[in-house]
Image (cartoon, rainbow, N blue to C red):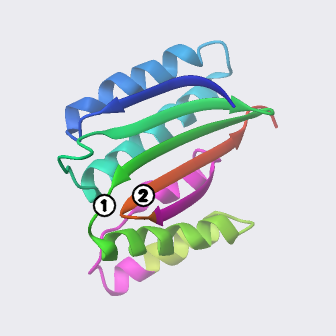
């Protein structure tokens, strides 16, 4: 993978501005639809990492990577998460988005779930990434570290 950005941020809301601007800058030569989708995806992934991650002394930052590989764009966040239920919920939310051929179906299903029992976090940002951004999502949770990867073909 050709790295375009490889940085770490502190898990505070104001830290999201710099990576978003950097994504726009390094992708400036690509179509605006791709740049907008990538910037939105970067923000949503970083917001989730801040909201559901943990700041621990051993790993006080969130890792953020943007890269090109074989005609595709990869956006990756890596953060600590000691809350196993939050990590499990994230993996459960990504599963239908990963498997569904039509990303609108899991989005509508999630909205209906929220209407009938809005007890959990909405995680609608993940649905935006898949539906509006056109990215496929994957996630792993190993040794209390969450890695979320969003992938989109650059053209077509």
Left or right, 62 with respect to 133, comes to: left
Considering depth in this image, is 56 or 34 the residue closer to the camera? 56
**The C terminus sits in image quarter:** top right
Tell me residue 20's x, y (percent).
41, 27
Q: Secondary structure at mark 1?
A: loop
Q: Say which residue appears at 30% left-offset and 61% top-offset.
A: 81
Q: Which mark is residue 146?
A: 2
Q: Residue furthest bottom?
A: 116
Is 4 located above or below residue 44 in the figure?
above
The quadrant holding residue 37 is top right
Q: Residues within 10 Å of mark 1 (few under 14, many from 20)?
A: many
Q: Say which residue appears at 42% left-offset and 47% top-offset.
A: 78
Mark 2 touches mark 1? (CB < 8 Å): yes
Distance Cα–Cα, label 2 vs label 1: 6 Å
Q: Say which residue appears at 44% left-offset and 73% top-offset.
A: 111
The quadrant holding residue 97 is bottom right
| Callout count | 2
Tell me residue 42's x, y (percent).
46, 38
Tell me residue 150's x, y (percent).
58, 47
Q: Say which residue appears at 53% left-offset and 77% top-offset.
A: 109
Q: Earlier in the sequence, mark 2 or mark 1?
A: 1
Left or right, 143 with respect to 91, comes to: left
Q: Which mark is residue 81?
A: 1
Q: Which mark is residue 64?
A: none
Is 56 located above or below residue 76 in the figure?
below
Q: Which residues are magenta?
A: 113-141
Left or right, 38 with respect to 12, comes to: right
Is 77 located above or below residue 19 in the figure?
below
């Amino acid at each position: 993978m050709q790295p375009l950005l490889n940085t770490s941020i502190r898990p505070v809301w104001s830290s999201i501005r710099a990576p978003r601007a950097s994504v726009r800058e390094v992708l400036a030569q690509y179509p605006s639809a791709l740049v907008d989708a990538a910037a939105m995806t970067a923000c949503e992934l970083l917001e989730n990492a801040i909201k559901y991650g943990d700041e621990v002394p051993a790993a006080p930052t969130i890792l953020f990577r943007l890269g090109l590989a074989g005609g595709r764009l990869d956006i990756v966040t890596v953060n600590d998460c000691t809350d196993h239920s939050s990590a499990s919920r994230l993996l459960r939310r990504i599963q239908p988005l990963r498997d569904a051929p039509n990303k609108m179906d899991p989005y509508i299903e999630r909205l209906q779930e929220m209407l009938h029992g809005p007890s959990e976090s909405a995680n609608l940002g993940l649905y935006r990434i898949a539906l509006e951004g056109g990215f496929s999502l994957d996630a792993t949770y190993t040794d209390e570290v969450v890695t979320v990867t969003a992938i989109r073909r650059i053209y077509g």
